[in-house]
Amino acid sequence: TFQNDDKIDSAVDFYLQAIAADPAASGSMQNLALLHWRRGDLQSAEKYLKEALALNPHMGLARENLQRLNQLRSHGHPGVSGFPLSRE
């Protein structure tokens, strides 16, 4: 819905500002990836997951989400089920 789209847009802006303030914020990258995924922008989701992993190679949640994204893509399913928020 439009209201949910506005909330996602606000959240994207928030995380972009957080990343601008702290470019090493891998958790913010992970959460930004989630938001792009929910929008259906899998390319951006993948980009931010890879950036999170480049900043923090031990970030298991980002690695799991990137694997899930690749699995969903390989099966032609762009869904978001099971995609968790950052807990790191």
Image (tube, rainbow, N blue to C red):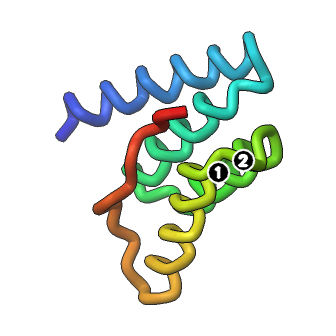
Residue at 23%, 33% (x, y): give it.
4
Where is residue 67? Give x, y as percent.
57, 70
Q: Nearer the viewer, residue 77 or 60?
A: 60
Q: Nearer the viewer, residue 6 or 78?
A: 78
Q: Quadrant of residue 16?
A: top right
- Which residue is tagged 1? 49
Q: Which mark is residue 58?
A: 2
Q: Against 54, is 15 above or below?
A: above
Q: For this view, does 15 lie left or right of residue 81?
A: right
> Residue type at mark 1?
Leu
Q: Which mark is residue 31?
A: none
Where is residue 6? Give x, y as percent.
31, 27
Q: Against 7, is 60 above or below?
A: below
* Local SS, label 1: helix
Answer few, some or many: residues within 10 Å of disc 2's Cα (few below 14, many 20 plus, some between 14 and 19).
few
Residue at 44%, 77% (x, y): give it.
72
Q: Quadrant of the N terminus?
A: top left
Outermost residue toward the bottom in this view: 75
Outermost residue toward the top in this view: 21
Where is residue 44? Give x, y as percent.
62, 52
Q: Quadrant of residue 55?
A: top right
Residue at 30%, 35% (x, y): give it.
5
* Local SS, label 2: loop
Q: Quadrant of the C terminus?
A: top right
Q: For this view, does 44 lie left or right of residue 57?
A: left
Q: Earlier in the sequence, mark 1 or mark 2?
A: 1
Q: Against 6, is 14 above or below?
A: above
Marks 1/2: CA–CA distance: 12 Å
